Image (cartoon, helix red, strand yellow):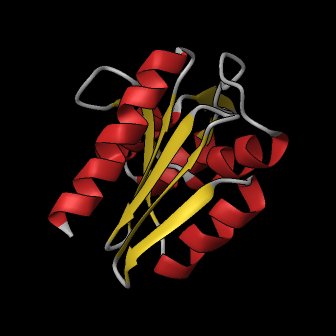
Amino acid sequence: MKYVPRNEYFELIGKLGVKKVESEYEIADLDLSAYSLNEDTKRIANVNFMEETEDRNGNYMLGGHWMSDLSYQFAKKCKFDLVQVDGYSSYAYSDEQMAVFTYTEGDIYLTLFTDKAKYEAEKERTIKFYEEEY
């Protein structure tokens, strides 16, 4: 088996088909060593987030899709402060881990930071967005 980053894995499925990719490739673990995440957050992020990307400000972000109730379990297990906006949206953050989590209608994002000022700015933007838009 050859290990490849998760974005590449899904690109290969589009090019080669599911059967060939599943027989020849595995998704490599995320390298989250630069971030101050606890072990539960690292483990859950590695298993559940399927896309590595950047947010609109160039910050490292993981994306995926979950059922609503899993976002609450994630926040509790990973020690994030959760704000339930409504039945379709929530956000959570961890000052200790410098990470912001958002959930909207099944779409999930976990934005990770190494810079405290950038984390604080994104946390404030997130809070403001949900307060003004919902």
Picture residue at 64% right of the left edge, 61% below the top: 75
In the image, farthest residue toward the left: 133
Residue 16, image x, y percentages? 36, 42
Check the image and name the residue furthest to the right.
Answer: 39
Q: Say which residue appears at 22% left-offset and 29% top-offset.
A: 56
Please, is residue 129 above or below residue 124 in the view? below
Residue at the (76%, 62%) spot, across then down: 77
Above/below status of 54 relative to 76: above
* Left or right of 74 on screen, residue 100: left
Quadrant where the N terminus is found in the figure: top right
Quarter of the image containing the C terminus?
bottom left
Image mark count: 0
Q: Nearer the viewer, residue 1 or 79?
A: 79
Q: Based on the displayed image, in which of its 4 quarters is residue 64 positioned?
A: bottom left
Instruction: Classify residue 95 as left or right of residue 7.
Output: right
The image shows residue 103 at horizontal and vertical percentages of 40, 63
Residue 62, can we see it?
yes
What residue is at 80 percent from the left and 49 percent from the top? 40
Please indicate, yes or no, whether residue 60 appears anywhere in the rendered image.
Answer: no
Query: Is 48 in front, or is 17?
Result: 48
Horizontal and vertical percent position of residue 42: 73, 40
Taking the view exactly as shown, the residue that stands out farthest to the bottom is 87
Most foreground residue, 65 or 129 = 129
Residue 67 on image: x %, y %? 48, 78
Q: Image check: 133 left or right of 4?
A: left
